[in-house]
């Protein structure tokens, strides 16, 4: 069913919500703050020092640090300098998703018995009122989860002021690198809560399934937020909860091809899991076609004319030597060099296409619990037709798919007025 054509200004207004009332002292919930760490020892002191200064009763919150097999002395730093923090040590890096889920389970079994779980990156410091403001929409039952206003470390520009995505799952951080402005001070509905600074009702977190551990890292927050909406819940942006972020301080030390695999694969998995049947059938061809084009762009194959028979000038006479060479070549595996980023794209795609039945089972488990139609979720995307690549042939393919598959009609009028977005 095609959607009606709303006006972008009307869509924008529909996302704006009233600011949550400040919580009275008696309303403050018990909170477990879960922080994942992987070789981030240098981040611990700035992060923990601001948490110690929170305007929040000390007996109502705890901090759980999940260390993913760091080899930089993070564990010793936590034990000696921050003994008030509950330390969970893993022998290896189990990933952001699994580490956060592990921290949530530890928190749920603690004596504090938290009502709200807060997930915070280790490379963040927070304002004193951060926690009160972040949990307010959850406590007020206005939303199942809330996300903070995330500023750059020096506070000069924004990193995130709510989130969305384009139609094939590439995540959007609203306000990315924008200067502070009053439009980013308005509470609103958001597709997802950024995993670097989010609060979520504990019972809902476990009921919805937490972060998908098969994602390992990246887009697990997009998937969780989208899944929450599918299940009938809401997610809010709480701009009065302010924090400051060292953007990509950990990921910047990981080889690009390893990050790229996750960044290509996980948006596809989120789409396959969360779109309804009708819309997935429409989006999937474009999702896969555009992914193939991006892999080709990054393949660095060089001269492609060697593959084209029409470029051959002559077959030549086939003597005994030529016949022998052809026979030997059949038994020797030859290939051209392919760029690692291009290979990572293909491996990421194969993680979906090579396990189709598995992902259809995962999808069914979510769709069986659907409580909200896509028509109510698509306006949260913010920039559904955002074209991620500037390469001319990619843009041509993007526009061609949008026209041929009816995506322009599906998302007509749903682009919001915000111009500053980032992946």
Image (tube, rainbow, N blue to C red):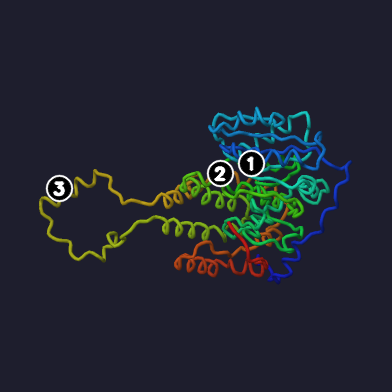
Residue 100, given in percent of the width and then of the height, sits at 64, 38
The residue singled out by tag 2 in the image is 250
Q: Which mark is residue 122?
A: 1
The residue singled out by tag 3 in the image is 324
Mark positioned earlier in the residue sequence (1 or 2): 1
Residue 16 located left or right of residue 350: right
Query: Which sits in the foreground, 203 or 90?
Result: 90
The tally of labels here is 3
Query: What's the CA distance linking mark 3 and mark 1?
Result: 62 Å
Query: Which sits in the foreground, 360 or 384?
Result: 384
Quadrant location of the N terminus? bottom right
Residue 6, given in percent of the width and then of the height, sits at 70, 70
**Crowding near the residue tagged with mark 3, few <14, some 14–19, many ≥20 C-alpha atoms within 10 Å:** few
Residue 371, given in percent of the width and then of the height, sits at 73, 52
Quadrant location of the C terminus? bottom right
Q: Is residue 25 above or below residue 281?
A: above
Q: Is residue 80 above or below residue 377?
A: above
Q: Which mark is residue 280?
A: none
Residue 75 in sight here = yes
Query: What's the CA distance linking mark 1 and mark 2?
Result: 10 Å
Q: Residue furthest left?
A: 320
Q: Quadrant of residue 88?
A: top right
Mark positioned earlier in the residue sequence (2 or 3): 2
Secondary structure beneath dot 1 equals loop
Residue 100 in sight here = no
Secondary structure beneath dot 2 equals loop
Residue 115 located left or right of residue 95: right
Query: Which sits in the foreground, 160 or 335?
Result: 160
Q: Quadrant of residue 217?
A: top right
């Amino acid at each position: 069913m095609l959607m009606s054509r709303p006006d972008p200004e009307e869509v924008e207004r529909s996302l704006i919500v009233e600011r949550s009332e400040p919580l009275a002292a008696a309303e403050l919930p018990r909170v477990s703050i879960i922080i994942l760490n992987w070789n981030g020892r240098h981040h611990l002191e700035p992060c923990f020092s601001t948490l110690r200064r929170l305007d929040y009763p000390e007996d109502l919150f705890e901090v759980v640090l999940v260390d993913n097999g760091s080899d930089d002395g993070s564990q010793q730093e936590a034990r000696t300098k921050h003994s008030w923090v509950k330390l969970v040590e893993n022998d290896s890096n189990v990933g952001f998703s699994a580490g956060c889920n592990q921290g949530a389970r530890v928190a749920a079994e603690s004596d504090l018995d938290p009502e709200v779980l807060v997930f915070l990156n280790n490379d963040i410091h927070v304002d004193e009122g951060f926690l009160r403001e972040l949990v307010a929409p959850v406590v007020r039952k206005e939303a199942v989860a809330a996300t903070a206003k995330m500023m750059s470390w020096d506070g000069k520009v924004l990193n995130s002021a709510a989130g969305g995505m384009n139609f094939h799952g590439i995540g959007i951080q609203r306000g990315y690198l924008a200067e502070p402005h009053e439009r980013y001070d308005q509470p609103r509905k958001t597709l997802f809560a950024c995993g670097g600074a989010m609060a979520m009702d504990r019972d809902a977190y476990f009921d919805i399934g937490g972060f998908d551990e098969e994602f390992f890292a990246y887009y697990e927050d997009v998937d969780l937020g989208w899944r929450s909406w599918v299940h009938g819940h809401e997610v809010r942006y709480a701009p009065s909860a302010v924090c400051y972020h060292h953007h990509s301080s950990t990921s910047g030390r990981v080889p690009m091809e390893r990050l790229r695999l996750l960044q290509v694969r996980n948006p596809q998995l989120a789409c396959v899991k969360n779109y309804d049947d009708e819309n997935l059938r429409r989006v999937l061809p474009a999702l896969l076609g555009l992914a193939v084009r991006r892999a080709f762009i990054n393949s660095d194959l060089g001269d492609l004319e060697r593959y084209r028979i029409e470029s051959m000038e002559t077959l030549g006479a086939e003597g005994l030597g030529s016949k022998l060479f052809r026979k030997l070549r059949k038994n020797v595996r030859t290939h051209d060099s392919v760029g690692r980023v291009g290979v990572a794209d293909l491996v990421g795609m194969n993680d979906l296409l090579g396990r189709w039945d598995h992902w259809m089972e995962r999808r069914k488990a979510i769709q069986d619990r659907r409580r909200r139609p896509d028509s109510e979720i698509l306006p949260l995307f913010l920039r559904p037709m955002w074209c991620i690549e500037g390469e001319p042939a990619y843009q041509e393919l993007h526009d061609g798919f949008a026209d041929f598959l009816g995506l322009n009609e599906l998302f007509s009028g749903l682009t919001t007025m915000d111009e500053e977005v980032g992946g």
